[in-house]
Image: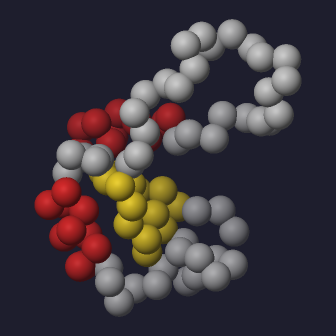
């Protein structure tokens, strides 16, 4: 079930879990409903969490609710919105 030409499910794998990343890539290689990516985050980019007046973003874009799962399991699964 591809949504708008893209995957419906997304595995985000901890950057240190390269063996798990390789395994998931092989396991889902023939399923266009699933995408597997490495987590690229290094932490907060801003030194302060204070509100910036000219910030055009409407909301936080990171998947924070899955952060503990990513740290504990080495990956998280995200269902993408249509």
* Rendered view: 6 above or below 79: below
- State which quarter of the image contains the C terminus: bottom right
Give the side of residue 50 with respect to residue 72, left or right: right
Q: Residue 57 in the image: x percent, y percent? A: 77, 36
Give the side of residue 15 with respect to residue 76, left or right: left
Report which quarter residue 58 is drawn in: top right
Report which quarter residue 20 is drawn in: bottom left
Q: Residue 75 in the image: x percent, y percent? A: 30, 51
Is residue 13 or residue 8 the one in the foreground?
A: 13
Report which quarter residue 41 is drawn in: top left
Q: Residue furthest bottom?
A: 30
Is the image coloured rainbow, by chain, by secondary structure, or in one colour?
secondary structure
Tally of marks: 0
Q: Residue furthest left?
A: 19
* Rendered view: 24 above or below 76: below
Residue at 58%, 62% in the rendered image:
80
Residue at 53%, 26% in the rendered image:
45
Residue at 55%, 13% in the rendered image:
47
Give the side of residue 67 with respect to residue 16, left or right: right
- State which quarter of the image contains the N terminus: bottom right
Residue at 82%, 34% in the rendered image:
56
Q: Residue 64 in the image: x percent, y percent? A: 50, 35
* Rendered view: 64 above or below 3: above
């Amino acid at each position: 079930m591809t949504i708008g030409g893209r995957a419906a499910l997304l595995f985000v794998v901890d950057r240190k879990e390269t063996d798990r990343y390789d395994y998931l890539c092989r396991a889902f290689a023939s399923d266009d409903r699933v995408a597997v990516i490495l987590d690229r985050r290094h932490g907060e980019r801003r030194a302060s969490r204070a509100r910036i007046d000219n910030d055009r973003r409407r909301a936080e874009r990171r998947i924070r609710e899955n952060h503990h799962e990513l740290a504990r399991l080495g990956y998280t699964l995200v269902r993408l919105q249509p």
